[in-house]
Image: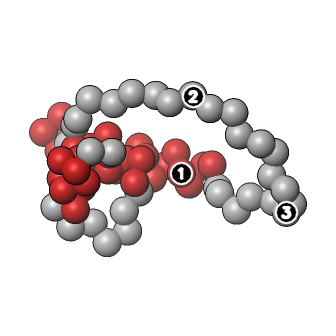
Amino acid sequence: MSRRVVNEINRLKECHGFLRGMVALVGFRQASVLFDRPARFSGKGNYNRFFGHFASASMAFFAFPIMR
């Protein structure tokens, strides 16, 4: 991320920030970086996909009240 993007994210005053959603929210141009990730060494992940997607959608809904 560039310094401009970081500065804009820091201005959002979010206390429970969902970084992926906030990056999209500030509105700068984005690019994908593809990479191969090795398998998890041990254990099981703790990320709840449903909650992650719900957080994304709700952030977009409440961030743009004019579009409703």
Circle 1 crowding by C-alpha within 10 Å: few under 14, some 14–19, many from 20 = few
Q: Position of residue 65 (x, y in %)?
A: 17, 44
- Rendered view: 39 above or below 15: above
Query: Where is residue 45 drawn, in percent x and y?
Result: 74, 58
CA separation in Å, label 2 and label 1: 21 Å
Describe residue 14's horizontal placement relative to residue 17 as left or right.
Answer: left
Residue 44's x, y, as percent? 81, 59
User: Dot 3 lies on which element?
Assistant: loop
Residue 11 or 33: which is nearer the viewer? 33
Q: Which mark is residue 34?
A: 2
Identify the residue under disc 3: 43
First along the sequence among labels 2 and 1: 2
- In the picture as drawn, the residue positioned furthest to the bottom comes out as 15
- What residue is pinned by disc 1? 52
Res 16 → quadrant: bottom left
- Callout 1: helix, strand or loop? helix
The amino acid type found where label 2 is placed reads Leu
On screen, residue 53 versus residue 56, left or right, reads right
Q: Nearer the viewer, residue 31 or 56?
A: 31
Q: Earlier in the sequence, mark 2 or mark 3?
A: 2
The residue sitting at 63% across, 49% down in the picture is 49
Viewer-side residue, 63 vs 10: 10
**Residue 10, percent from left and from top:** 22, 62
Real-space Cα distance between discs 2 and 3? 24 Å
